[in-house]
Image (cartoon, helix red, strand yellow):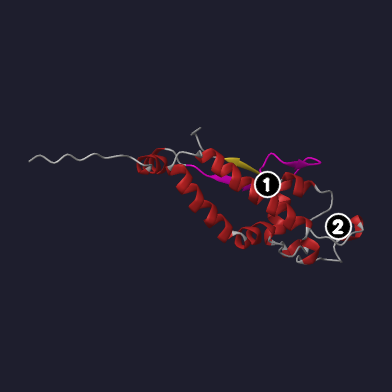
Amino acid sequence: MKARVIDIDKGYNNLFKLNKINPSGVDIGVFSSAKNKGKSVAEYAIENEYGVPSKNVPPRPFMRSTFDQNVDKIEDMIKVFVKAFIKRSISERDFFKTVGSMLQDKIKLRITDSKSWAIANKASTVARKKGGDTPLIDTGRLRQSITYKTTTGSTK
């Protein structure tokens, strides 16, 4: 008696190929192209994220803290994505756009709300010049520069 085996791919091969040949992801933050009056907004972001003691700038981790606060949500999104991807109802590009957009909005909100959590340095020159007490917001350019880029080649 001959046995007949039928292998029906329900998405595993797509996930395997995706991992092997098509590295994908999303980069979120301030990119080197963002400028404010000729100066790099990315450098300003790094200085505020990690602090610069020599410039009297305390750490204000607006990006790391946003990610940390949303890890569970991101993990839930990944679970939903894997199921949808297997069913071929979402592309990897669309998934990473969704994650990028969500984190972009969350980081911008974190900057907007920095008055409630970030260390304000009243003695700093910037605080005196701008006349405000919301850390991370001077001209608003940092918040405007938060964006994302998908790194995927697949379209569906």
Give me the residue at 67% from left, 48% from top: 104
Q: Quadrant of the N terminus?
A: top left
| Of residues 127 and 118, the one drawn nearer to the viewer in this rendering | 118
Q: Residues within 10 Å of mark 1 (few under 14, many from 20)?
A: many
Q: Residues within 10 Å of mark 2 (few under 14, many from 20)?
A: some
Q: Position of residue 26 (x, y in %)?
A: 56, 45
Which of the labelled discs sits on residue 30, or is there none?
1
In the image, 60: left or right of 5?
A: right
Q: Residue furthest left?
A: 1
Residue plotted at (84% across, 48% down)? 139
Identify which residue is drawn at 44% across, 41% down.
87
Which label was assigned to residue 39? Answer: none
Q: Residue furthest front?
A: 1
Task: Determine the image quadrant of residue 109.
Answer: bottom right
For the record, the magenta segment spans 24-40
Q: CA distance from mark 2 to mark 1?
A: 21 Å
Residue under circle 2?
126
Contact, CB < 8 Å: mark 2 with mark 1?
no
From the viewer's side, name the closer residue of 127 and 149.
149
**How many marks can you see?**
2
